[in-house]
Amino acid sequence: MIGGGRSQGRRTPRRGDLSVGAIARLAGVSPPTVSKVLHGRAGVGESTRERVEELLREHGYRRPVPEGSASGLEVVFRDMVGSIAIEIMRGVEQVAATRRLGVGFTDVGSLESAGLPWVEPLLLRRPVGVIAAVPDVTAEHRGVFEAHGVPLVALDPTGDVHPAPSVGSTSWSGALEATRHLLELGHRRIGLITGPAGFLAARARLDGFLAALDTAGVPFDERLMRGGPFLAEHGRDLGSQLLTLPDPPTAVVCGNDLQAFGVYEAARLLGLRIPDDLSVVGFDDIEHCAWAAPALTTVRQPFAEIGATAARIALALADGERPPRPVVELGAALVVRDSTAPPRSA
Amino acid sequence: MIGGGRSQGRRTPRRGDLSVGAIARLAGVSPPTVSKVLHGRAGVGESTRERVEELLREHGYRRPVPEGSASGLEVVFRDMVGSIAIEIMRGVEQVAATRRLGVGFTDVGSLESAGLPWVEPLLLRRPVGVIAAVPDVTAEHRGVFEAHGVPLVALDPTGDVHPAPSVGSTSWSGALEATRHLLELGHRRIGLITGPAGFLAARARLDGFLAALDTAGVPFDERLMRGGPFLAEHGRDLGSQLLTLPDPPTAVVCGNDLQAFGVYEAARLLGLRIPDDLSVVGFDDIEHCAWAAPALTTVRQPFAEIGATAARIALALADGERPPRPVVELGAALVVRDSTAPPRSA
DNA sequence: CTGAAAGCGCTTACAG
DNA sequence: CTGAAAGCGCTTACAG
């Protein structure tokens, strides 16, 4: 983590940190020979190479990292749900590991609340690339990173236009698939809880939802739509509003899983059983969906693959390549569990 | 992330990466003057210093990190529950940020399953310290890190003896408190699902549980005890065994939250309602406890503070200090929610 | 295959 | 306050 030393003519020796000259003396060879071994260059005898390798290992000498790959890949979050963040980290890690790069973690939210800066220290670490899983990658951030020559890849960008490069998932198709699932079960009055207005992904899900109803010839009652933050408490409150309507929906499609669990609570408070009295669909597939009561039917976002793809794009950019597709959307797919069933009336 | 370059006489310039000499030329001063500015040494005029600072910033020149702090803090997990891992990362991050150090992430499980090595690449990054949140920090690992002069702090160690340094939480007291809570509600037949035999923390929880019963003068029916992996499916299976006993328990204390959610499912399958027919207590307080149905009463482990404490110890060791307390246990405290209530019979 | 020589980028110690 | 000179650790180009 953190960038390492920049060229320095000299450094005080550290435990297990001998100089090339010292290793050379120990091996009974000249510094240039040790240098060749360090860089895997030709022109060193087999036995000499082995002896030097052995001494380097023994003294924990660290080979200089390849030019340009000073640091590693840094992933930046803002108050992300734990299981999503970890899945993304694992995806990034797998790609980074193939290049022997490390993966750094930054949670902007927790740093800001402690009054600590994050952009400058992160830049100080000279990352090979930055993957920003924050809902607010501004043009300003892009400018700062670009000025330092650090490629930035956004995850699930939510700005007005898709800024390249970015990686997300097929929100529109996912919402379409989820809604079709409910239609196939026989639901006709389907409520929708969507995310905050500014979120492009929330808008895509809304559109996919409406497209499913539309192509099925089912008219949408606008009173069945609510919008709010991607949190359980808002799912609960907005869900309550929908479920206490004179003619309530028999199913609710939620903007994410947390909202869906909020709807679970709203239903419980009203004495409604899921899926008997109400079907619920989430979005994301966070860790707990499978063990919720009942297990939540949801649209799975392939977070590990999203992280891996972002890492590949960041690495390509760092190498000076133009990735063939700077804006990528990976397939989000419906996972049917126990929170959806035919409506009572059917 | 990842170690930076070691002393190198020369390096090809990188975008935004000018040499000291080049900066000196641009500023119209000599290289030694730039060097002084870089290291904050005295003997540079105010206006000269400002001009050089400005040029350094403009060209993204990275100051050499302080001697010895080559890299950052690396946190190593093995298939950890997402919300726990992220809480630990945030705690480590807050302490690391005060020193402008980055925080690296390694998931051994996902790397191993991809056939990728992790110890050597991690060492190559020259971390200031390593925090191991894996259940299997072996003496061998300790040896390797020690040989490289990298301090290692274990989290919640599970070996035969507490290897110093390590940070955990008060498992024994936590389990005692949880069990007392159930006793106070009037429960007398309390079941226990414990973790795998090798886990020291699981043993501490078991002992705390027994101590609570013992000091309350409540005899323990050994048939009410089961043990297995810290996973929901095992909680479900072991919970089923307890609940189908001729004289089943009215409450169950679980080794962790995942097991508790497994017991939720076992109860559901048997038509038992929580907390009316059965009280359940977990351990950890993962993200979803608050929104489960019903919200889970559990013993909260202060993961962020555990991470922060481990980071402080690692940093102290890296500085060559002997931390006053190399083995630390932070207080785990009961969080009462909706999964516990007086037994039916009371 | 090997190393003496030259050179590079940086820092230190010191002269002005 | 400033920089010429010396020195350090490393690498490169080349002679043997």
Image (tube, coloured by chain):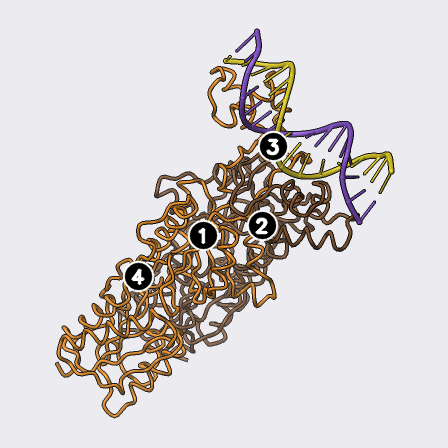
Chain colours: A brown, B orange, C purple, D yellow
**Which residue lies under the disc numbered 1?**
B151
Q: Residues within 10 Å of mark 4 (few under 14, many from 20)?
A: many
Between circles 1 and 2, the one closer to the viewer is: 2
Numbered label attached to residue A9: 3
Q: Is residue B27 visible?
A: yes
| Coordinates of residue A34 in the picture (x, y in percent) | 69, 45
Residue under disc 4 on the same chain as residue under disc 2: no
Question: Is there one chain holding both mark 1 and mark 2?
Answer: no
What element does badge 3 sit on? loop
Give the distance between the C-alpha atoms of the residues marked 3 and 1, in whole angstroms: 27 Å
Quarter of the image where one finds residue A149: top right
Give the camera-side residue of A9 and C15: C15
User: Real-space Cα distance between discs 1 and 4?
Assistant: 21 Å
Task: Give the secondary structure at mark 4.
Answer: strand
Classify mark 2: residues with Cα within 10 Å, few (<14), some (14-19) or many (20+). Answer: some
- Cα–Cα span, label 1 and label 2: 16 Å
The amino acid beneath tag 4 is Ser
The amino acid sitting under disc 3 is Gly
Which residue was labeled with disc 2? A59
Q: Nearer the viewer, residue A290 or B137?
A: B137
Residue B169: numbered disc: 4
Identify the chain of the residue marked 2, using the numbered disc in the image.
A
- Identify which residue is drawn at 56% across, 66% down: B112
Q: Depth-wise, is mark 2 or mark 3 nearer the camera? A: 2
Q: Nearer the viewer, residue B219 or B16?
A: B219
Tag 2: amino acid = His
* Quadrant of image for the C terminus of chain B: bottom left
Q: Which tag is nearer the camera, tag 1 or tag 4?
A: 1
Instruction: Label 2: state its secondary structure.
Output: loop
